[in-house]
Image (cartoon, helix red, strand yellow):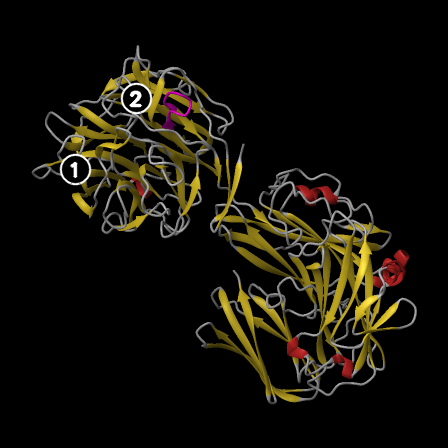
Amino acid sequence: RSSDLTTTQGSYVIGPSFRPFPHSATQSEVDVTTQKGNPNVIFAAWNSFGPSFFGTGYTASIDGGVTWAGSHQTFNPNSGDPANWIWPVGSTWAGRFGHSVIQGAAFSNTNGASWTGQVNFPGASSFDKNLSAVDDVTGSPFFGRAYTVWTNFGGTFFNRIVISFTTDGGVTWSTAAPVSPPQSTGHHHQGCDIRVGPGGVVHVVWANCTTNGQNSTEDSLGYARSTDGGVTWAFASNSVADMNGIRTINLVNGIRCNGFPRLDIDKTGGPRNGWLYVVAGEKNFAPALDNSDVVLMRSSNNGASWTRIRVNQDPAGKLNYMPAVRVDDCGGVNVVYYDQRNVSATQAEVYLSRSMDGGNTWIDIKASDHSFTPGPIPGLAGGYQGDYIGVTSTGNSVWPFWADNFSGIYQVWTAKINIGPDLWSKDTWVDDGTEINPDNGAMWVSQDIWVRTQQDGFANPHQHQNPEYRDSILYPYNPNYIYVKVRNRGGCYASGQLKVYWAKASTGLSWPTQWINYFIGPTLHGNIIHTSMPIISNLAPGDSIIYEIPWFPPNPSDFSGFGSDSSHFCLLARIETSPVAPYGMTYPEGAGVYTNVKNNNNIVWKNITVVDDFTGPNGPMAAGWVTVRNVERETANIRLNFFTPKKDRDNPFLKYGRIYVDLGEKLYEHWRDGGMQGDGIELAEGTKIEVVKYDASIGNMKLRPEEMATIKLEFDLFEQPPRGRDRFTMQVEQYTQLGGDRDVITGGENFELNTAPRRKGGEVQNAVKEFSTNVFPNPFNPVTNISFALPVGSNVEIKVYDLLGREVAILVNEFKTKGIHNVKFDAGNLASGIYFYTIRAGEFSETKKLLLVR
């Protein structure tokens, strides 16, 4: 079964280990590749031993790893040691499998079912340790050219790395020519690998080994680069980086092992495009800590310099060996290797380490779901269990391939590791993004959507305020603001589009009927908030971002037909990662909003109340609503706390007014049945309770599972506070008793109380401070509007600065009369980025951030 792993670099789903082509013949030394341009095609091959036959077997999938075909032999005869490639989409031989072995190669036009074109490499002599690659770089002058490199242990280029290439789809191959320079005394070149980088540049690495049989230590890294399709070498050296490989005749249980380098190149077009990544098993040479660690050698400048980094993150003392490397389409560097961290000194598992920052930091993923006991394969060379393993990637998946004897004999195994992007938002605080959400409770309480009446949602994350109705025509620069937090729990950078909708709350909301241009009579009852919604661009694994959407809520008075429910509305946020249905959803959406939200972690829902109930001092000042709900699956006691934060306790609202809590008939009855427990409260008329101190509570309200109730907060101002002391904070928290005397907070609301005179319909009131400002839109491109309100006439100065504090614009520098003013800021001649504007009037000033996005 699959397992989930959450890390600092995102969440991963590790599929079960399986044999893609089980067989009675032993399988070892596996190499694997995929087709550029078609991630559904995967091709792996290995050494196959009967023992009545020896050669190469293969497996292939043409549906992204859902099903697999294969055979215990490819073409016959061959002497084994497979290396694989697939000609890329767009080339003359697109989809053709290429397959090199000791001394020669062949190709298949039938996904491996049959093979033709078997040919020996001209000039090969005592051939060993071959690996291959194809030029799959679009626009390369050598697009479709395939290459094979190996060591000639005899003949003209004795003990050196040589190359052959084909320009006609594998029909003919060039005569072997040297890659590595002549070896120094006591050394030979072995364990080469080849890849084609951006621009069609060919890169080859090898181990410069001390010559000592199966104990020939890898002494330094050799590297060569060709810019003319492997004909000549612009650079070649036997020692670009020191290393101390692990090659030995007996690493564990009598198996031989090597520290040969494996190579891959970033071709994503991203910030590390063209970087070279080489991995090898090394010992007792920093950063290797002990007898066998996996070391990355990285070059960001075409091999001119190299940085050495330890890959495996386990403590010293265990073996980590025989790595292979793959850079996936997300730019992630993936390294597979055998590992002993969890098992005894005679066993091993398979791990995959992954880095999303070019190898600076790593997370380790256990790829195999079983351990095994390494040992030599009977009937083959002494100590042999294979000299390589492999790894490839397809779209949003990484596929490590290895061989072990867990089934009784050595077989090739693999596992699908899902690294794909996974943009999501939380339904509740405890939601972890699992699809389908295991919670069967309310899906309409998302904490990742919140509304603020001012543009301060970044400074107050997840602190929801009931939005205020404001006339968008009379006051176009004074919206409320919706904030949505988007997270990436996947292992790749993720992009998409955020869309936010509103609808009039009612039972049985359906999608998309009541959310898109939905009219009942002349009144709009639901729609998308804006036709132009935020674009989510390259959100890093494990990261999150908050988006801000200005909003003028509907006028509750337009919904008088709903009676006392006229002020209740819903917000729905949907993250789309595809422009076509099902828009990136795991489960295609049906009519039921509840089911859509529960099934898909990229849809979230919040019930809200729109407020339009302000009349000024000496009367009801404001009303707010708080939804109380038992989120448990059994009857539970609920306690509500009403308090003023410590920072505001020297300026208590209760000095100037009264706070009433109207529980309503249902909740009041529950409270009465529970003994009417509370502190800092007094009974008022009907179902109302008056809060008489800044830290009050009412408790022991017994609610059934999923039972909900709405309480109303009323703020009655009997004295106008002095200027500068007319804003207060009121917080309500809900606690649920889960057992015994233990209470756990399960929700809350935050209310900003502004006691300055206000008028119904959202007209701008006297300034909270000596002046108030707002900006809309923000982010903007390239024009935005800055509005400000003055209680009295004053000289006003508005200046704009860049991040370095340099003045880039003066918008206002003159006397302005009392009232509301709007200033247009056109940033058409400025670069994208963050700017700040400062407004000064009299002795007061304020600075706010602007974000210019092109």
Q: Which of the numbered marks, if any, corresponds to residue 377?
A: 2
**Mark with earlier residue (1, 2):** 1
Q: Is residue 155 visible?
A: yes
Give percent across and percent down for residue 325: 35, 39
For the N terminus, which image quadrant? Answer: top right
Is 408 magenta? The answer is yes
Q: Is residue 609 visible?
A: no
Give percent across and percent down for residue 571: 72, 55
Distance in Å between CA atoms under marks 1 and 2: 25 Å
Give percent across and percent down for residue 515: 75, 49
Residue 785 sits in quarter: bottom right
Near-viewer residue (341 or 259): 341
Seen in the picture, residue 348 relative to 550 is either above or below; the reply is above
**Would you name the residue on which mark 1 appears?**
209
Which residue is at the far top? 52
- Which residue sits at x=71%, y=63%? 748
> Which region shows up in magenta?
403-411
Q: Main secondary structure of the magenta part?
A: loop
Is 157 magenta? The answer is no
